[in-house]
Image (cartoon, rainbow, N blue to C red):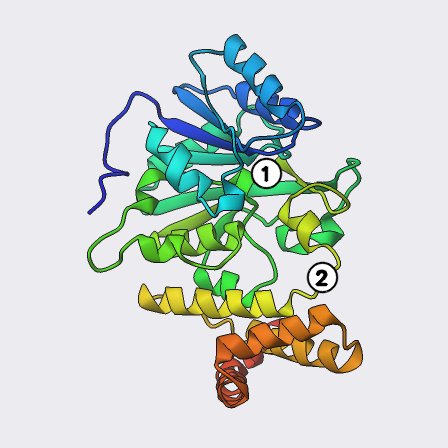
């Protein structure tokens, strides 16, 4: 078993910052972290993935200003484009904290008590493995963009369950709003952690699913961070996927999450979401007939192992989602 989460350190929290061509935003990101008021020590590990703008120079300035707080990893070649896992291979091996927090270079924290609130909850609730909070969503021009990411609509304080994730329309928060126990990334002979790293699922959903398989997830209702959605330029996931047919990608994601949850003895009945992806992929292929629509349907068929496999999956999901649809409708009535 990995001892990643079992080491004792003076540092309580490691804040992981990933940056690439974030020259316009990285100062706001780092300022939001440095301003944190805590009664414990925290470190900041900043990874720059060979930015071609001035991001690495700005990071270097902060390193010189806070040499005992900030650790920098400045790549000469882009590692993400080579298929490397930035967190697993570069940041986590250097992390000293028993808790891990995250903030991508174009996001930022707004509440100086953010870390303190989350750590206090984790310290007083041993069964809780992760604490999220609410976030604002803005675009590259700082305009409200929550309508483009309704899954991040702030929630009231309370527990967030696997059924909330599988059946609901919102996440407990976004990556920059998360603090989790380092032990979440521990593996075992029965449940090897490599299964998690191999998941073809986007980062937010992937991390949340892992947390739900490990213990309780809690949401603090306060809005304490800002997530920036950059769609019109840059190399972010949002920019690269803007305007594309993602029904195939999302279908594969839902199948992967259900498979992973099942391997961890966790129910994850996201059948309705899978069905919507299938309907979307087929409908767009029939109506628009564009190359990306053909690719989306091809991915759905590849995941399902052909039309017959897809038919079986659709029938199974249709039957299994009926009880949950009835519950959903009853709740709406009341």
Using a 10 Å C-alpha cutoff, classify the residue at mark 2 as few (fewer than 14 neighbours), some (14 to 19) or many (20 or more). Answer: few
Side of 111 where 119 appears, left or right: left
Q: Residue at x 66, y 76 (%)?
A: 281
User: Does residue 158 lie above or below 69 as drawn?
Assistant: below
Residue 99 seen in this snapshot: yes
Q: Nearer the viewer, residue 167 or 328?
A: 167
Residue 283 appears left or right of 12: right
In this figure, which residue is indicated by the disc labeled 1? 222
Q: Position of residue 114 (x, y in %)?
A: 53, 30
Q: Earlier in the sequence, mark 1 or mark 2?
A: 1
Quarter of the image for the C terminus: give it: bottom right
Residue at 56%, 47% in the rendered image: 173
Residue 244 disc label: 2
Residue that lies at the very extreme toward the top in this rendered image? 65
Q: Note whether 249 is above or below 193 in the view shown.
A: below
Quarter of the figure with residue 119: top left
């Amino acid at each position: 078993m990995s001892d990643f989460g079992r080491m004792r350190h003076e540092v309580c929290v490691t804040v992981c910052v990933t940056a690439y061509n974030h020259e316009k935003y990285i100062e706001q990101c780092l300022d939001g972290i440095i301003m944190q008021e805590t009664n414990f020590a925290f470190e900041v590990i900043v990874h720059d993935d060979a930015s071609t703008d001035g991001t690495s120079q700005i990071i270097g300035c902060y390193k010189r200003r806070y040499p005992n707080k900030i650790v920098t990893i400045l790549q000469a070649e882009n590692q993400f484009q080579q298929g490397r896992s930035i967190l697993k291979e570069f940041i986590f091996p250097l992390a000293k904290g028993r808790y891990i927090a995250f903030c991508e270079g174009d996001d930022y924290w707004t509440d100086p008590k953010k870390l303190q609130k989350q750590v206090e909850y984790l310290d007083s609730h041993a069964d809780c493995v992760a604490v999220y909070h609410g976030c604002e969503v803005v675009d590259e021009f700082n305009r409200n963009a929550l309508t483009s990411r309704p899954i991040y609509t702030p929630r009231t304080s309370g527990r967030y369950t696997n059924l909330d994730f599988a059946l609901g329309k919102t996440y407990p928060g976004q990556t920059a709003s998360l603090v989790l126990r380092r032990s979440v990334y521990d593996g075992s002979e029965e449940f090897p952690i490599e299964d998690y790293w191999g998941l073809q699922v986007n980062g937010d959903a992937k991390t949340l699913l892992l947390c739900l398989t490990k213990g309780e997830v809690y949401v603090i209702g306060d809005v304490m961070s800002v997530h920036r959605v950059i769609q019109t330029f840059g190399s972010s996931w949002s920019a690269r996927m803007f305007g594309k047919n993602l029904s195939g990608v999302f279908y594969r994601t839902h199948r992967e999450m259900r498979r992973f949850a099942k391997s961890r003895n966790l129910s994850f009945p996201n059948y309705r979401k899978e069905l919507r992806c299938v309907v979307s992929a087929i409908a767009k292929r029939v109506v628009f007939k564009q190359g990306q629509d053909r690719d989306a349907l091809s991915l759905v068929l590849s995941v399902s192992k052909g039309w017959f496999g897809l038919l079986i999956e659709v029938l199974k999901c249709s039957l299994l989602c009926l009880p949950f649809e009835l519950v959903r409708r009853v709740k709406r009535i009341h």
